[in-house]
Image: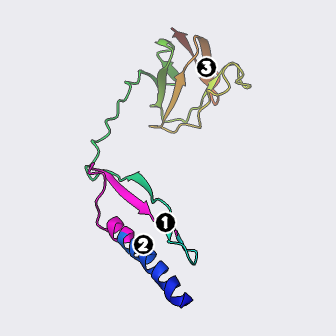
């Protein structure tokens, strides 16, 4: 007899559980595009002799990524200010160059001999230690961007009598 009473009590609880699960599977959500509504069904507590009392369902809305492709990202590139110094006939052309801060200077070796651009003084290169190229063979170039204002002397490390000056203004 007690088993029948317990069964009568459990069956309505299971029916509620089945109905809640079925309602959660129908796909009915908030109706807003881009969302899916989920329902979590808590367990039903049944005590023999009492009717089952399910706790209220827990619901939540989870955003779903849009199926519409995002517009392409447009890159804005700042125009680089560039100045050139040619290395020919064992000289820098021009020997003195005035530029704005942020300008990149490109030295290009047009001699048949190798050269190496380096800051003064020779051989320590301490005025602007980061201004030092690898050895440039004929046709090779070296780029350096001047960010601080000032006057910078440089020379060819391999031929120290070759000298040049870069004046950087605001």
Residue 32 falls inside the magenta stretch: yes
Within the magenta stretch, is there residue 38? yes
Q: Which residue is mark 3?
A: 154
Mark 2 vs 1: CB contact within 8 A? yes
Residue depicted at 55% across the width and 19% down the height: 147
**Mark 3 neighbour density, 10 Å: few (under 14) some (14–19) many (20 or more):** many
Residue placed under numbered mark 2 in the picture:
17
| Helix, strand or loop for disc 3 | strand
Residue 31 position, x and y percent, is 26, 51
Q: Is residue 134 above or below residue 92?
A: below
Q: Circles 2 and 3: CB distance less than 8 Å? A: no
Distance between mark 1 and mark 3 Cα atoms: 85 Å
Chain-order first, disc 2 or disc 1: 2
Instruction: Report whether 52 appears left or right of 133.
Output: left
Q: Is residue 106 visible?
A: yes
Residue 123 percent location from the top left of the image: 72, 26
Side (left or right) of 54 relative to 20: right
Query: Which secondary structure lies at badge 2?
Result: helix
- Mark 2 or mark 1, whichever is nearer to me: 1
Which is more foreground, mark 1 or mark 3?
1
Q: Which residues are magenta?
A: 20-43
Considering only order in the chain, which callout, 3 or 1, is on the residue closer to the N terminus?
Answer: 1
Q: Position of residue 75 (x, y in %)?
A: 34, 34
- Farthest residue toward the right? 124
Mark 2 and mark 1: Cα distance apart in space = 9 Å
Mark 1 highlights which residue? Answer: 54
Q: Could you tell me how many numbered marks the image carries?
A: 3
Place of residue 74 in the rendered image (x, y in percent of width and height, measured from the top left): 31, 35
Q: Which mark is residue 158?
A: none
Q: For the residue labelled by badge 1, is the local secondary structure a helix, a strand or a loop?
A: strand
Q: Residues within 10 Å of mark 2 (few under 14, many from 20)?
A: some
């Amino acid at each position: 007899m007690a088993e029948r009473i317990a069964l009568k009590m459990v069956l309505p609880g299971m029916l509620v559980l089945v109905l809640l699960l079925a309602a959660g599977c129908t796909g009915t959500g908030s109706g807003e595009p881009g969302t899916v509504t989920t329902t979590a069904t808590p367990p039903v507590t049944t005590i023999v002799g009492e009717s089952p009392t399910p706790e209220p369902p827990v619901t939540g809305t989870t955003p779903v990524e849009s199926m519409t492709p995002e517009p392409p990202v447009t890159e804005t590139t700042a125009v680089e200010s560039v100045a050139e110094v040619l290395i020919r006939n064992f000289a820098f052309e021009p020997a003195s160059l005035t530029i704005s801060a942020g300008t990149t200077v490109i030295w290009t070796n047009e001699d048949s001999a190798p050269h190496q651009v380096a800051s003064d003084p020779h051989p320590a290169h301490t005025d602007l230690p980061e201004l030092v190229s690898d050895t440039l063979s004929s046709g090779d170039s070296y780029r350096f961007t001047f960010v601080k204002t000032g006057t910078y002397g440089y020379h060819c490390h391999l031929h120290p009598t070759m000298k040049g000056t870069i004046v950087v203004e605001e």
